[in-house]
Amino acid sequence: MWDICPMPAAGCFPGLSGGGDMWHDYYQMLEMTEEQARIRAEELRSMIAENNRLYYVDNAPKISDYDFDMLMNELIAIEKQFPRLVTPDSPTMKVGSDLSGGPVSGGGASSRRRNSAETAPREFVQYPHRYPMLSLGNTYDISEVEDFVQRTSKSVGNTGFTLSCELKFDGTAICLTYRKGRLFRALTRGDGVMGDDVTENARHIRNIPQHLCGSGYPDEFEIRGEIYMPYAAFDRLNAERERDEEAPFANPRNAASGSLKLLDPEEVGHRGLECTLYHIPGDSLPFSSHDEALKAASSWGLPVSDKRRICTDIHGIEDYIAYWDTERKYLPFATDGIVIKVNELALQKTLGYTSKFPRWAVAYKFKAEQALTRIVSIDYQVGRTGAVTPVANLEPVQLAGTVVKRATLHNPDQMQMLDIRIGDHVYVEKGGEIIPKITGVDTASRDGSEAVPVFPDTCPDCGTPLVRDEGEARVFCPNASGCPTQIKGKMLHFISRKAMNITAGDATVDQLYTLGLARFPADLYSLTKEDLLRMDGWKDRSAGRFLESIAASRKVPFGHVLFAIGIRYVGESTAKTLAAHFRDIHALMSATKEELLKVEDIGEVIADSILSYFADSRNMEQIERLEKAGLQFSVQEDDKPVSDSLKGMTIVISGVFSVSRDEMKRLISAHGGKSSSSISGKTAFLLAGEKPGPEKLQKAEALGIKILDEAGFMEMISGNAPEKGDSPEVETENRQLTLFG
Ligand code: IVH
């Protein structure tokens, strides 16, 4: 959602994210006034909050770690220059949170509950951490690791010390508690103070032992580490998701944290997650060093990395970093850096902690992997908001496991800053985003045949002169209501899965537009079957399904509708926050800027965008039409099931249905059931659409689980289910399915 230009000027901003005292005072040079700094700090906090949520909760980051660290560095620099601007809830003061909802203290399974559909679901009981679960100060600059070693040396005086160098595993943090040698509890980091209880899921991770072996372990102790997904498991999972028309995970880290938060422990077991443990917290451990502690953990059967090295000086650390910067490409799992820890526990205690980090450890992060290729041409793409983005077509090149053919150049400033030419050899990188970006040009390889690209001054789609607002890096086509790409882009956004979830793609939107049948979202709600049959290749059945899907979208909750209408900067989670706060579109429309700014995570940029959206009479007209069409423009007070015909049933779905799989899942929960992705003895029945997965069918058969088709299911939830015993049999493509077993 954010189109971030994280740095106000080109270049690398050195410094430990949040380290506080190891960065250069870049912003002093910018001579910001306090008022300018206040506005920018708010903007940064809002961007950091949104990106934290995308990272920790949605597992779908939109910016790279590097860009995120740069945002944080900028905020730290501002707060350092203007200490009066520091707020107690500033992200510089706390670690990100992966909690699945607000804090609920864990008193046992009885406190488990779900929130209303309008807020983030809270699926796990939360418990406090015995010791806060902190993060690590990080740097991309080896000279700052040197500073760390020197500073440590100064603080500990004449006492000699050693350093443990370790891989930085790129997954999601976990804290395991063993009581009397048995796995007692597994908590995620959460917000560092409370974590989500994912014990049942952890029990299904193959290398986490349920019982310790050997002897000498404390009666009760905690051990912390990382859950990660090896590349092979990640590729397998994404292939499955694509086959099932689900969005693939952007990287193994998101796949790991998403999988660890699944509600179905058996499915977690199928995801191929692994664990490595790297820290035993505590004040009075029976060890003198970190290395000794991990060796003991290993002897008890706990998974500890054998890639650790004890170094005595910066040269040893540099060698370790240089070695793993290359070798990590051959590891079967992702690493994003090296962690350097003071090895002696007594010295760790002396050095202590800041509010966010231990002072006895630091992370050196690797820059993202790069590849060198050539720019063949540049396209200027118009997005749904009218932003015109330059996209380079590249000679295909292999990068971090995939072939890259296109890369974004973001905006004219970025093109100018890189001094890009068509024909240039360029470096491409993949960050948190799925689309890679160009980070540098190999100017030495120019031979004079390269051409300077010309950013168009008119829209490549509708010919309208492009505009660029003051302070805005991007160039826009202002013809929002007439530019075909913007109109179609808005429609595609409106119908997308996380918005109104109407099953159609580019081709349908294109045809609807070309034939003048639906140009604006509200037009969809007056389409008739006759209209649709005018479109190429459409038949009674496809038209019927499309109309059903449109009709079903009338039930989509307000938060999704708010996201669907496409207010700039209002992403999926901001829309949910606004819906939960204002409860109704009219309250939101009449909110003043002050009222908007009071809402959690809403800063100046979003508030202004909301105000200008509702100030536009064309938007108001669309909302009026959508409201008349029966869409949900207020929060429904209850998310009580429509019926309890599926109460207590766990249902597995497989195959293709006349409506989307998400809609089928929604129906299951609306009728009191629970959907699950894997079959077990607890499965009530397998709901099989067309071409169900053969493995699921086999497993259902082997376990004697009932198999039900869509029609049977619809009958069941409408209360017209045939009695057991008189169930008809239906033929599907592959095999005979028996209704109700
Ligand atoms: S030590 C008190 N060691 O990286 C801090 N962390 O970006 C204890 N991580 O929060 C953490 N590999 O989730 C440590 N070898 C390693 C690590 C590691 C990955 C994670 C961990 C940490 C995050 C900081």
Image (tube, rainbow, N blue to C red):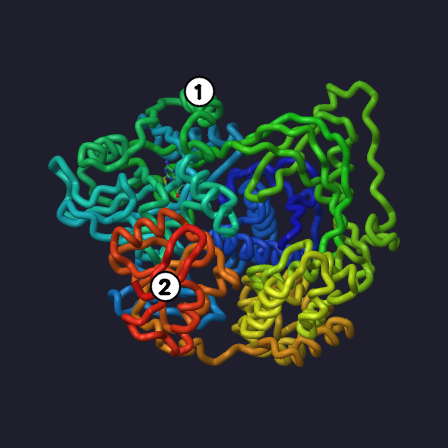
Q: Which mark is residue 729?
A: 2
Q: Residue at x 47, y 68 (%)?
A: 119
Q: Quadrant of ligand 1?
A: top left
Closer to the camera, 730 or 592? 730
Residue 123: in sight, yes or no? no
Q: Residue furthest left?
A: 215
Regarding mark 1 in the picture, which secondary structure is present there?
Answer: helix
Per the model, the C-alpha gap separating discs 1 and 2 is: 68 Å
Q: Which residue is mark 1?
A: 319
Percent from the top left, x then y, of residue 334? 44, 35
In which image quadrant can residue 545 be found?
bottom right
| Residue nearer the viewer, 670 or 457 | 670
Apparent side of residue 643 relative to residue 532 in the rendered image (left or right)? left
Instruction: Please name whichever residue, 305 or 253, is drawn nearer the observer in this view of the structure.
Output: 253
Q: Judging from the image, what secondary structure is the residue with disc 2 in?
A: strand
Q: Position of residue 401 (x, y in %)?
A: 52, 32
Quadrant for the N terminus in the image: bottom right
Which residue does the image show at 67% across and 60% down from the upper left? Answer: 538
Q: Percent x, y for residue 466?
A: 84, 52
Whether residue 386 sits left or right of residue 310 in the image: it is: right
